[in-house]
């Protein structure tokens, strides 16, 4: 489990750091919060304690804490994120000041640091802040945002803290360089398939490919060697990913069955058609005067079942189940039937999630009977949760 140190300083956006802490905790990180004294005037430490289930560190000389807490915090952090980062903490970091617990910890840590600045636009554009940030960037500090928009001070302009989900992305990117899946060959399928009725028509589905593409992008960021077998999709191929595009379920089967045995993890996120026309007409079907057109359909190959049959020892096989009701019962049945290591079940009719949405709400089911119900979250975050679980299963199988 990775440790994230979240530094919260005295900006109005401190309330948004609560959501950030919650999201990072849900992703399975151990989140420890250090607040500046001024931050505690804006949000109470008890809120962070409740969200992270960890004590909040406030002072260098607190009774009861470890005697050298700043050193412990600095050493155990895999990433330090400061959100919101005030002009003050940015200046202190740039100059190496260490006059409270957070600034001292920041000076003592060698973990990657992510800053999410938030301030009034004049403070943001002040030459002192500009030069301090330049110094920090040169030292490898990652800076996310700020965004432009209406500011708490009533002005318009740059200075709004980035949204928590954008900051999570940056934290994951910073962690990605710690290579949870370094060098691991993985295969991901994405998008829907198309089964031809005639040269111009097909049977398709509403899958956008977003979930599968997020799985591929996040795996690449975690250091995996990623092959993505995708149905037709408008999405760009994520950086560092080798993409093969297919159209039909049969084409997907061929590519996947050939590539899967050499992979340590296979994630079937594609929405593969269950049925296809018995025959595709060679010519466009004319409307003519017919009142009805009957299409005869036949089952497509069951790729997941085939993969579980040819699965090499130690490979982790993950299926997706897009359901529209009685989610868990159906997912449990699918889990038994397909013999996968993990099944990601999501209700695609749920408002705000599922097909074409950037968000998803899922339940993870494991071969050992464990079930993890997750909140609604961006697909990239869900992808990170799934890969962390896959990585744990790979460790169990002796990576
Ligand atoms: C209500 C309120 C909101 C503030 N918001 C910000 C802010 O968004 N960004 C900033 O850099 N400073 C802001 N300040 C000023 C900082 O709190 C001040 O510079 C303080 O010394 C920062 O201390 P810290 O960095 O140790 O938390 C705000 C002050 C008040 C009273």
Image (tube, rainbow, N blue to C red):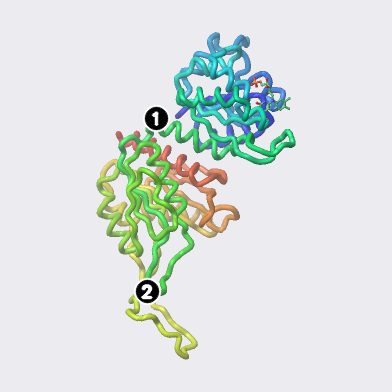
Frontmost residue, 231 versus 45:
231
- Where is 291 relative to 372, above or below? below
Which residue bears the numbered disc 2?
A: 277
Q: Is mark 2 within 8 Å of ligand 1?
A: no
Q: Secondary structure at mark 1?
A: loop
Residue visible at 44% across and 44% down?
369
Which residue bears the numbered disc 1?
A: 178
Image side of residue 315 versus residue 236, left or right = left
Sooner in the amino-acid sequence: mark 2 or mark 1: 1
Residue 359 appears at what percent x and percent y?
A: 54, 49
Label 2 – label 1 distance at C-alpha: 47 Å
Q: How many marks?
A: 2
Between disc 2 and disc 1, the foreground one is 1
- Where is 30 relative to 104, above or below? below
Residue visible at 66% across and 41% down?
149
Residue 145 appears at what percent x and percent y?
A: 56, 35
Quadrant where the N terminus sits is top left
Q: Quadrant of residue 175?
A: top left
- Where is 224 relative to 53, above or below? below
Residue visible at 56% across and 58% down?
349
Quadrant where the C terminus sits is top left
């Amino acid at each position: 489990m990775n440790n994230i140190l979240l530094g919260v300083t005295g900006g109005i956006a401190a309330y948004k750091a609560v959501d950030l802490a919650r999201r990072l905790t849900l992703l399975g990180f151990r989140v420890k919060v250090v607040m500046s004294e001024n931050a505690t005037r804006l949000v109470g430490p008890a809120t962070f304690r409740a969200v992270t289930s960890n004590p909040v560190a406030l002072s260098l000389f607190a009774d009861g804490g470890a005697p050298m807490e700043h050193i412990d915090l600095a050493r155990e952090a895999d990433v330090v994120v400061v959100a919101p980062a005030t002009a003050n903490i940015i200046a202190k970091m740039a100059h190496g000041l260490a006059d409270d617990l957070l600034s001292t910890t920041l000076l003592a840590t060698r973990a990657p640091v992510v800053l999410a600045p938030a301030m009034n636009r004049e403070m943001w554009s002040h030459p002192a802040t500009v030069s301090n940030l330049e110094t920090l960037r040169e030292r490898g500090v990652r800076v996310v945002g700020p965004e432009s928009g209406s500011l708490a001070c009533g002005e318009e302009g740059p200075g709004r803290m980035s949204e928590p989900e954008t900051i999570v992305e940056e934290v994951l990117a910073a962690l990605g360089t710690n290579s949870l899946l370094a060098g691991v060959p993985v295969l991901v399928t994405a998008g829907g398939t198309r089964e031809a009725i005639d040269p111009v028509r097909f049977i398709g589905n509403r899958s956008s490919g977003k979930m599968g593409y997020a799985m591929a992008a996040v795996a690449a960021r975690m250091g995996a060697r990623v092959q993505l077998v995708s149905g037709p999709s408008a999405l760009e191929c994520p950086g560092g990913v080798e993409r093969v595009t297919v159209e039909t379920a049969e084409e997907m089967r061929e590519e996947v069955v050939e590539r899967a045995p050499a992979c340590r993890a296979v994630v079937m996120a594609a929405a593969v058609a269950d049925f296809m026309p018995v025959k595709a007409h060679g010519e466009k079907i004319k409307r003519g005067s017919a009142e009805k057109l009957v299409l005869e359909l036949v089952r497509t190959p069951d790729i997941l079942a085939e993969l579980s049959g040819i699965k090499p020892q130690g490979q982790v096989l993950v299926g997706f189940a897009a359901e529209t009701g009685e989610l868990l019962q159906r997912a449990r049945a699918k889990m038994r039937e397909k013999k996968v290591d993990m099944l990601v079940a999501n209700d695609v009719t749920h408002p705000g999630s599922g097909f074409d949405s950037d968000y998803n709400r899922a339940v993870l089911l494991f071969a050992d009977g464990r079930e993890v119900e997750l909140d609604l979250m961006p697909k990239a975050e869900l992808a990170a949760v799934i890969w962390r679980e896959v990585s744990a299963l790979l460790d169990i199988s002796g990576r």
